Amino acid sequence: MSKVYQMGIEATLEVIGGKWKPLILCNLGLGPLRTGELKRNLPNVTQKMLTQQLRELENDQIIAREVYNQVPPKVVYSLTEEGKTLRDILVAMSEWGEKRIEQAQLSGEDLSISRGYEGFMEM
């Protein structure tokens, strides 16, 4: 049976939806990173969740995984050309979120942003 999407955004969210995938992609926008570097940049993600999200992004051909034959093993993740096409989407999402946070701050909410979307600005 063929899969039917209600809207195109459903296909997009299937690939980059969730809390961690966009953050992983923005980090990789700065350049290739090892798993440990990603984990340090995303301190609230569990190792299990990070591994799961990386596998899903790799299966969807959004990121590439390169394993170096050395001891200890070295694994480096990078964006594929397909992954780089998500730049405008992720920047737009970040800009929207920043405006929303600014509005909440003006309403007296105690919110802040530790980093922007600079990863995808470099591409």
Image (cartoon, rainbow, N blue to C red):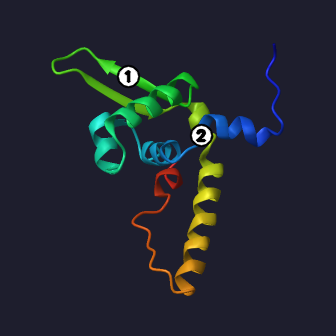
Q: Which label number is shown at residue 66?
A: 1
Q: Give the image location of residue 19, x and y in percent.
A: 51, 48
Element type at mark 2: helix
Three-letter amino acid code at the position of disc 2: Ile
Q: Which label number is shown at residue 99?
A: none
The alpha-carbon separation of the residues under discs 1 and 2 comes to 21 Å
Q: In the rendered image, which quarter is residue 49 located in?
A: top left
**Residue contact between numbered discs 1 and 2, judged by CB atoms under 8 Å:** no
Give the side of residue 98 with respect to residue 8, left or right.
left
Q: In the rendered image, which quarter is residue 101 located in?
A: bottom right
Instruction: Report the front residue among 62 and 85.
Output: 62
Q: Residue at x 57, y 60 (%)?
A: 94
Q: Residue at x 64, y 65 (%)?
A: 96
Q: Is residue 112 above or below residue 23?
A: below
Q: Earlier in the sequence, mark 1 or mark 2?
A: 2
Three-letter amino acid code at the position of disc 1: Glu
Q: In the rendered image, which quarter is residue 37 located in?
A: top left
Q: Give the image location of residue 5, x and y in percent.
A: 81, 32
Q: Which label number is shown at residue 16?
A: 2
Give the side of residue 84 with respect to residue 118, left or right.
right
Q: Residue at x 51, y 42 (%)?
A: 21
Element type at mark 1: strand
Give the side of residue 20 with respect to residue 89, left or right.
left
Q: Is residue 27 above or below residue 58?
A: below
Q: Characterize the local packing of mark 2: few (<14), some (14-19) or many (20 or more) Cα atoms within 10 angstroms.
A: many
Q: Characterize the local packing of mark 1: few (<14), some (14-19) or many (20 or more) Cα atoms within 10 angstroms.
A: few
Q: Residue at x 81, y 13 (%)?
A: 1
For discs 1 and 2, the disc positioned in front in the rendered view: 2
Q: Give the image location of residue 6, x and y in percent.
A: 84, 36
Give the side of residue 34 with respect to residue 3, left or right.
left
Q: Give the image location of residue 79, x and y in percent.
A: 49, 35
